[in-house]
């Protein structure tokens, strides 16, 4: 729960917890040097800092040494005392005790008040009392040796290269901090210090990505927010790369999934650049500049320190503090606008980069639309004659209504929006695909019309990239015959065009079965139960109201305007997406095989077992 797993990341998370505790000492001005030692064999490590040293006097409540309480009790660390740390990256007092609990052996050494103290633990339990091992030492600090428990972790083997990379990142985020990595597995020793801070980290990210900078000047801002107990550092630069790269940190912890501080940065960049372009009339006509265009090629580092960060999950992948978004946006937007106005060479290059991105995106979309249109025109040669196609050539925006009968098809064709809605009428009940071979299925006229209209093929040759409509909507009468036809079509799609269902492209429309007129108001009911609920509600409000009920025998009885307002209009209709949850796949297959297959005994048992629950048959 606390370290995210027992694999490689969970193992190294133990080390990061101890390192983060040491970095907290440095961030809050109590330490300047950290030494991380990886011992021979790569199965144990030691983290040492020159901070104040963990307190060793007795805890006022537990009457045990404070060191022992911190290493054996959850939520007992200094992070819970606002006087100890203004900002902290550890697990809020949980980290050290978790490392101890998951270590086969742990030795804590503290230098404090001229003495060296030591206490040993095994799997979270003290095996020795806290004792003084020297009474003549200089300086102060904490050193913790730990050996992860082989009964817990899948494999205990620390990765030297990964550790070195993470430790160096810590020194980018704390420019005054020096970290030494003594790797006794490879026999190498590294010392990391970066006085340039995150500006050096940004240069490194751009260099490693082999991305050419679009402008020479780097934007950098430091903003102190004393009232909120926060501090912000942001460095950014546009490049000729085609993607956006943002590295974010909170209290020295990398937030790989971003969070509210990254959202605030993106808001600030979008608003500052758009405001600059608008003020200086640099927005070209007939060109829509999107947020993605503005951020394309952007490299940024966000380093935030907060008193009380709220993370998503114990492993701190994402920051959740809602206030952070507005704080970052306000601080960065103003500073970035000032930067753009004060550096005309850089701002000209940035604006040119944004416009180039917008034009490239527009050209790309136009080319893709042209290809889709050409492909659509080629496929139209094979479309069924009864299909009333739509004018749009973009499959993402289009819908196909498969309707029951020419009469309903006529109403649907008149009531639809011709721009994006197509209608395919079917005649009668289609073939039961569960009881037929694929060859026989394809020979069926109605099912053949469906496959031709969709244009993506069937069976093993089905290709979703050729799908002509991204919404396939089954629109049948709201009676038993309509339900039967919908079931037959779903059986066909399930057995021979399953990717359409898995991709979320198949829907069932719910047209009304009844119209209820109460005075000047009209209500629509999907079925008998819905009609009764509406009637009860109306009579409860107006006991003497006269309710006129009309039952539709079929969709063909509806006027086109009525069908449009109740069933076709995207904002007024009711659609059910056809989905198969992973846990229901076997059950779905069993139900379709039983109810639609050749073995009639399954259907007989189903009818006999459920007949008692039927109040009225729609025959």
Image: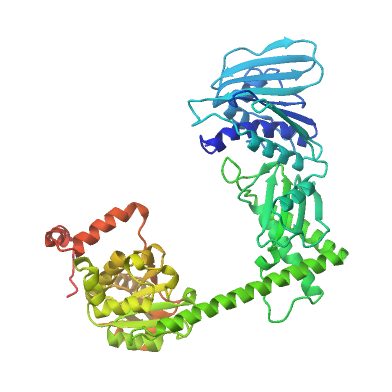
231 vs 293: above or below: above
Toward which corner of the image does residue 114 lie, by quadrant? top right
**Residue 187 point in image, percent of width and height:** 69, 26
For residue 143, side relative to residue 576 (left or right): right
Q: Position of residue 73 (x, y in %)?
A: 59, 26
**Residue 227 at x, y = what percent?**
78, 47
Residue 491 at least partly seen: yes
Pick the quarter of the image with the C terminus.
bottom left
Above or below, 377 against 129 in this view is below
Q: Indicate left or right for 492 with 59 as reference.
A: left
Q: Residue at x 53, y 25 (%)?
A: 149
Q: Nearer the viewer, residue 404 or 368?
A: 368
Residue 93 in view = no
**Looking at the picture, how far across and down is residue 124, in whole percent?**
55, 22
In the rendered view, how is the structure colored? rainbow
Which residue occupies the extreme right position in the image? Answer: 342
Question: In terms of depth relative to the viewer, which is nearer, 90 or 66?
Answer: 90
Question: Which residue appears at 31% of the width and 68% of the height?
Answer: 493
Q: Is residue 198 above or below residue 488?
A: above
What is the tally of numbered marks visible in this picture?
A: 0
Along the viewing direction, whichever of 335 and 56 lies nearer the viewer: 335
Image quadrant where residue 30 sits: top right
Q: Quadrant of residue 272?
A: bottom right
Query: Which of the pair 125/614 is nearer the observer?
Result: 125
């Amino acid at each position: 729960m606390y370290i995210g797993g027992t694999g490689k990341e969970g193992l190294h998370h133990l080390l990061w917890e101890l390192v983060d505790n040491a970095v907290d000492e440095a961030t809050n001005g109590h330490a300047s040097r950290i030494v991380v030692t990886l011992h021979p064999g790569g199965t144990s490590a030691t983290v040492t800092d020159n901070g104040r040293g963990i307190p060793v006097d007795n805890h006022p409540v537990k009457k045990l040494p404070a060191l022992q309480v911190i290493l054996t009790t959850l939520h007992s660390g200094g992070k819970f005392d606002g006087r100890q740390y203004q900002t902290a990256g550890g697990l809020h007092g949980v980290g050290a005790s978790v490392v101890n609990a998951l270590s086969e052996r742990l030795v804590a050494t503290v230098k404090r008040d001229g003495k060296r103290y030591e206490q040993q633990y095994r799997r979270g339990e003290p095996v020795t009392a806290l004792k003084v091992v020297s009474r003549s030492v200089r300086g102060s600090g904490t050193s913790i040796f730990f050996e992860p428990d082989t009964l817990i972790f899948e494999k205990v083997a620390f990765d030297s290269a990964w550790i070195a990379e993470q430790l160096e990142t810590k020194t980018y985020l704390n420019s005054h901090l020096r970290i030494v990595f003594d790797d006794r597995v490879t026999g190498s020793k590294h010392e990391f210090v970066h006085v340039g801070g995150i500006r050096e980290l940004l240069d490194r990210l751009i260099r490693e990505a082999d991305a050419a900078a679009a402008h020479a000047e780097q934007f950098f801002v430091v903003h102190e927010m004393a009232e909120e107990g926060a501090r912000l550092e942001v460095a950014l630069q546009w490049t000729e790369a085609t993607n956006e790269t943002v590295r974010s940190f909170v209290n020295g912890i990398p937030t790989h999934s971003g969070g509210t501080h990254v959202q605030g940065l993106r808001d600030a960049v979008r608003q500052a650049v758009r405001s600059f372009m608008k003020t200086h009339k640099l927005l070209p006509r007939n060109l829509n500049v999107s947020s993605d265009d503005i951020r394309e090629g952007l490299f940024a580092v966000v380093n935030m320190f907060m008193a009380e960060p709220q993370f998503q999950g114990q492993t701190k992948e994402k920051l959740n503090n809602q206030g952070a978004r507005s704080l970052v946006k306000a601080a960065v937007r103003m500073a970035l606008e000032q930067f753009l106005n004060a550096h005309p060479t850089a701002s000209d290059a940035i604006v040119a980069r944004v416009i180039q991105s917008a034009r490239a995106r527009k050209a790309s979309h136009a080319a893709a639309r042209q290809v889709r249109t050409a492909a659509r025109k080629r496929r139209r040669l094979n479309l069924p004659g009864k299909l009333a196609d739509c004018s749009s050539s973009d499959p993402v925006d289009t819908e196909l209504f498969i309707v029951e009968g020419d009469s309903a098809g006529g109403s649907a064709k008149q009531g639809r929006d011709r721009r994006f809605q197509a209608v395919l009428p079917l005649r009668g009940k289609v073939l039961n695909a569960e009881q037929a071979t694929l060859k026989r299925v394809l020979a069926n006229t109605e099912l053949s019309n469906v496959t031709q209209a969709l244009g993506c093929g069937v069976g093993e040759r089905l290709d979703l990239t050729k799908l002509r409509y991204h919404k396939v909507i089954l629109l049948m009468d709201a009676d038993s015959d309509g339900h039967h036809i919908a079931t037959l079509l779903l059986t066909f799609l399930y057995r021979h065009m399953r990717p359409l269902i898995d991709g979320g492209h198949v829907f069932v429309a719910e047209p009304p079965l009844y119209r209820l007129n109460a005075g000047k108001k009209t209500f629509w009911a999907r079925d008998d139960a819905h009609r009764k609920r509406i009637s009860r509600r109306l009579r409860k409000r107006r006991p003497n109201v006269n309710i006129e009920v009309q039952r539709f025998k079929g969709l063909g009885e509806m006027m086109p305007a009525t069908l449009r307002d109740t069933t076709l209009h995207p904002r007024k209709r009711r659609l059910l997406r056809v989905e198969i949850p992973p846990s229901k796949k076997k059950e779905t297959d069993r139900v379709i095989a039983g109810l639609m297959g050749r073995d009639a005994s399954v259907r007989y048992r189903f009818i006999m077992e459920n007949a008692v629950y039927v109040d009225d048959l729609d025959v």
